[in-house]
Image (tube, grey):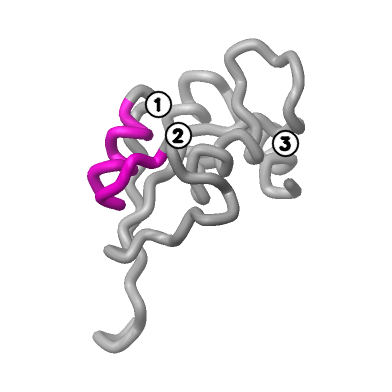
Amino acid sequence: MSANDPLEIVIAPISPFWIPTLNLLLGEEVRKRTKKDRKRNPNAIEVAAQNVFDRPNGAFTGELSAEQLMDIGLRWTLVGHSERRVVLSEDDSVCGPYTLE
């Protein structure tokens, strides 16, 4: 990486702070925007979820699909981070399907 390479910064706050963080970074009310007019963050700072469910939308209580995360403006998520691997015993066989969506 050189000094001229573009830099992307992604932060992953806990879920109650996704919308306030997006609002702060984007300087607009995120909930009022639609998918069609949603723009990338001009500050090159993005917001990520700390987890994602590997199935599409449906009745999966407490789980959020990639599509649902994108609906509120999140384009990134953590998958297979160390805490989930240690505490919840998620290994590559659990994390692998998340990357196929």
Q: Position of residue 15 (x, y in %)?
A: 40, 26
Residue that badge 3 annotates: 93
* Disc 1 to disc 2, C-alpha distance: 8 Å
Q: Secondary structure at mark 1?
A: helix
Per the rendered image, the range of residues in magenta is 17-30
> Please, what is the three-letter code of the amino acid marked with disc 2?
Gln
Sequence order check: which comes first, mark 2 or mark 3?
A: 2
Instruction: Name which quarter of the figure residue 44 lies in.
Output: bottom left
Residue 70 forms part of the magenta stretch: no
Foreground residue among 28 and 42: 28
As drawn, the label of residue 32 is none
As drawn, the label of residue 50 is 2
Residue drawn at point x = 65 percent, y = 32 percent: 65
Sequence order check: which comes first, mark 1 or mark 2?
A: 1
Q: Position of residue 42 (x, y in %)?
A: 32, 65
Sequence order check: which comes first, mark 3 or mark 1?
A: 1
Q: Secondary structure at mark 2?
A: loop
